[in-house]
Amino acid sequence: MAENEKTQANALEAKQKIKGTITKITIGGAIVDLGTDQLPGVLHISQLQKEHLTKVEDAVEVGQEVEVWVRRAKTDRIELTMIEPLTLEWREMKPDMTVKGKIERLETYGAFVDIGAERPGLVHVSEIAHGYVKDPSQVVKAGDEVDVMILEVNRRKKQIRLSMKATLPEPAESASNPKRGRGGKRRSSKKSVEAMMAELEGDEPKAPEHTAMEMAWQAALDRADSSKKASKKEEKVQKDETQDEILARTLKERK
């Protein structure tokens, strides 16, 4: 092969779109003239259209001008396709890769994004934005162009997990803007700080204040307890006196 032919072939890149003219048709495909400075292009019958084809003549004819994409350049020919290639092949997708896409449709659990692959990728609702997002429609809509990061690719299951928030800057934390709960109320940190300070200083926890009813109930319990103790004391005295009387009578009888 001449040096200029090598240079021209090497200048072509995979997925590059070019124009050519059908010069010959065979059972297995067609030959395409890509210009005087190019090697002949070869179109296999399977690359003429997405649908199954039994005859090349049903798709192209000699003299027809066609738009084709480069599949690969070889030493003696350039393999072509008339089927528009994917922007991203499965082998080209890697985790942490950032790509552009378009929101294809929304579901309650996330958004499907067309990134030019065989299948759209899914951005789960938790990966749409920083912070809580109840529904994807709060942030995006179908047709929006977005930047996404590839999180995981499963070629066997044909699944692509994406993230939008991974391409966004982290929200700035500010002391003047304390965190809020889902209800929008500020979370007070005063109690926790006081508790921490008391713990550091060794303060004893304060006794809880009782209500009037609790105080009355406690007083009644105390009175009942005192009465019970007095009754037991009186019973013990009487028992001791009885025992002393019996002992004295016994000693008197023995005399």
Image (cartoon, rainbow, N blue to C red):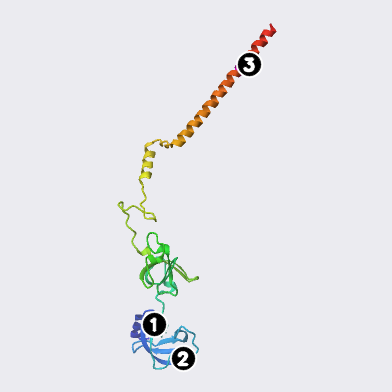
**Between marks 1 and 2 in the image, the one whose residue lies nearer the viewer:** 2
Question: Which residue is tagged 3?
Answer: 243
Give the image location of residue 192, x and y in percent: 38, 44
Q: Earlier in the sequence, mark 1 or mark 2?
A: 2
Mark 2, other Cα within 10 Å: few <14 / some 14–19 / many ≥20: few
Quadrant, the C terminus: top right
Residue 2 magenta:
no
Give the image location of residue 243, x and y in percent: 63, 16
Kind of residue at disc 2? Asp
Using the image, tell me which numbered label, if any, was put on residue 58: 2
Using the image, tell me which numbered label, if any, was put on residue 69: 1
Give the SS element for disc 1.
strand
Q: Earlier in the sequence, mark 3 or mark 1?
A: 1
Measure the C-alpha gap from mark 2 to mark 3.
Answer: 129 Å
Measure the C-alpha gap from mark 3 to mark 1.
Answer: 122 Å
Residue 241 magenta:
yes
Q: Residue at x 54, y 25 (%)?
A: 229
Kind of residue at disc 3? Gln
